[in-house]
Image: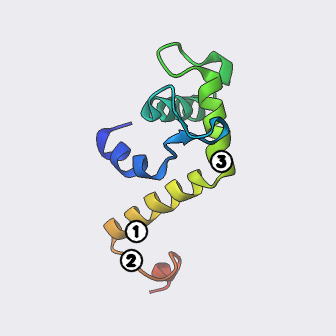
Amino acid sequence: MTDPQWAVIEPLLLRHDPRRGGRPLGYPRRLVIDTILYVLRTGCAWRLVPHDLAPWDVAYRWFRCWSADGTWDRVHDQLRDAVRVVEGVTHGLPWARLIT
């Protein structure tokens, strides 16, 4: 993940593990995100994640947590809105642009 991509996504992620009562992450969130993206891009099994990334069980736990609490939806919405601004579509439905 590039620095500009991380700057957009970082504020949208939880800073603590809700299952551990607010204890900070044991691994950098950016490394966890890189691990999750690696699995999603390559289709590799969680247990086969390379050792230079976060441990598979840590990344998987956060993937499930962020899926359940809507974090991925917030990230998706933020990125979609950024693309719309860049393309000049700041209001209305995305398909409305096709009609004009």
Q: Going 40% across and 68% down the picture, which residue do you hit?
A: 84
Question: Is label 1 or label 3 in front?
Answer: 3
Please state the horizontal and vertical placement of residue 98, each as a whole percent of the image. 48, 79
In primary-sequence order, the first of circles 1 and 3 is: 3
Tag shown at residue 12: none
* Left or right side of 95 for 19: right
Question: Is label 2 or label 3 in front?
Answer: 3
Q: Secondary structure at mark 1?
A: helix
Give the spatial CA distance, label 1 vs label 2.
Answer: 6 Å
Of the pair 81 and 61, the residue shown nearer to us: 61
Please state the horizontal and vertical placement of residue 37, each as a whole percent of the image. 52, 35
Query: Does residue 44 show up?
Result: no
At label 3, the amino acid type is Ser
Q: Which residue is mark 2?
A: 90
Q: Residues within 10 Å of mark 1 (few under 14, many from 20)?
A: some
Q: Residues within 10 Å of mark 2 (few under 14, many from 20)?
A: few
Given contact means CB atoms under 8 Å apart, are the residues at marks 1 and 2 in contact? yes
In primary-sequence order, the first of circles 1 and 2 is: 1
Give the spatial CA distance, label 1 vs label 3.
Answer: 24 Å
Which residue extends farthest top? 51
Q: Secondary structure at mark 3?
A: helix
Q: Which residue is mark 3?
A: 67
